[in-house]
Image (spheres, rainbow, N blue to C red):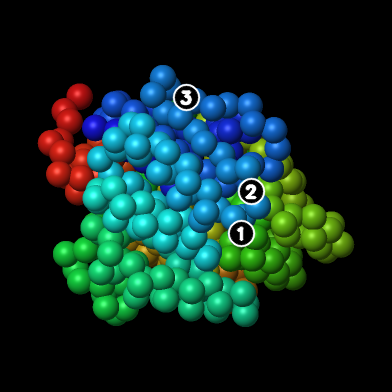
Amino acid sequence: MNLLMISGDRQIVIGEKGPFYSMQREFSRYFDRIDVIVPKPSGPVRVSSIHGNVFFHPSDRPSRGLGKFVRSKGAELLATHGHGLVVSHDYGRFAGGRAAAALAKKFSIPHVSELHHIAGEPVCESFAERVERFLARRYVAWAKDRVTAFRVVNDGPMPRLLRAWGVPPTKIAVLPSQYLDFEVFRPEGGSLDERFDVIFVGRMAAGKGVGRMLDALELCESHGFSFRTLFVGKGPMRAGWMARAEQASLATRWIEWVDAPEDLARLYRSSRLVLCASTCEGGPRFTVEAMACGVPCVSTPVGIMEELLQDGEAGRLCGFDVPSLSLALETVLCDEPARRAMALAAVEKVQPFAYARAIGKYANGLRRMAGAPERTL
């Protein structure tokens, strides 16, 4: 069976090996060929294929022309390789999903629309997020009678939202996107070189709540606690947040990119706590990776975090306000015996996300929706 994917991940084509690259190492074993259409990259194309049977087709047009490119390139690929399923990772203006639906109809194949999260859900931080949420609701209303299924990555907020928007439960497929290589993301015995109190990893954009993190760290300082914090990621708001942290004299370090998962795991293990202040997430992935390394978590109740943390067991939940975030940080970091107990619990909580098993569940879920037999490796 061949698979056509419409993805927003353009890291691989410019030579960066992020989570999508690692996922495809196992995922690609479940299909004979995978073609991935991606938006126009931010730099020169350095990689066109990986793992022997995964081929990338970057757009040569600006983002507003993505839908037209997906239709033309997708039709060319489908006519040549006869894919049994088209999967679109959908967000923003949903050009990829609408184009994928048109291709699915033209070639009489199933279409799975992946909605990892909805911007502005559960909390809207800006007018832009309110617009994105409106566009998402319009897309779901349009697509619900066209798609074979919507794939969501948690069994909590997203299925509830889609049902409220009129999607039949039979068209909601829960296939988690958390898959961890426990050979990489694992605790290490002996004493840890804990150079940081707090670590955050992710895109430097409004919905990630980094501004609230900085406010919370300032509030902790006013209470007499100075926490050394590492921020890993790049994005449009990074420079402004760095300047803000410097102006407030916060003990922060900023890293733009980490080359390999092993390097990222070492950074997790050098930290006492992982912090998520997002207002909308499907996962998030970085908190689960850190927990596998024996790092407890403070997080807002997004994605799967409420289920994973069981407030007080593997970390603490906090609200979307600065005082709540500050209190959770101080509660965990100022009680070392409790923090270490949470660290042990964190490792146990993420065991269901073993790399090969979780990816196999995802891949075979797609094969079933395409009407193909499951593949046993």
Quadrant assignment for the C terminus: top left
- Residue 332: in sight, yes or no? no
Q: Give the percent coordinates (x, y) of residue 17.
A: 55, 31
Q: Please tell me whether mark 3 or mark 1 is closer to you in this view.
A: 1
Instruction: Say if 340 sits above or below 113 in the image.
Output: above
Instruction: For residue 254, say whether it is visible.
Output: yes
Q: State how far apart marks 3 and 1 are (Cα).
A: 27 Å
Q: Which residue is mark 1?
A: 64
Label located before the other in sequence (3 or 1): 3
Q: CA distance from mark 3 to mark 2?
A: 23 Å
Quote the CA–CA distance across marks 2 and 1.
Answer: 8 Å
- The image position of residue 89, as x and y in percent, is 42, 53
Q: Quadrant of residue 116?
A: bottom left
Q: Position of residue 300 (x, y in %)?
A: 48, 67
Considering the numbered disc 2 on the image, is that residue within a helix, a strand or a loop? loop
Q: Residue at point 46% right, 55% down?
A: 96
Query: Looking at numbered disc 2 in the image, what kind of residue is underneath it?
Result: Arg
Q: Amino acid at mark 1?
A: Arg
For label 1, count other residues whose C-alpha is less than 10 Å away and answer few (under 14), some (14-19) or many (20+): few
**Circle 3 residue:** 50
Q: Are marks 2 and 1 in contact (CB under 8 Å)?
A: yes
- Report the residue marked by disc 2: 61
Q: Residue at 70%, 37% (x, y): give it.
A: 43
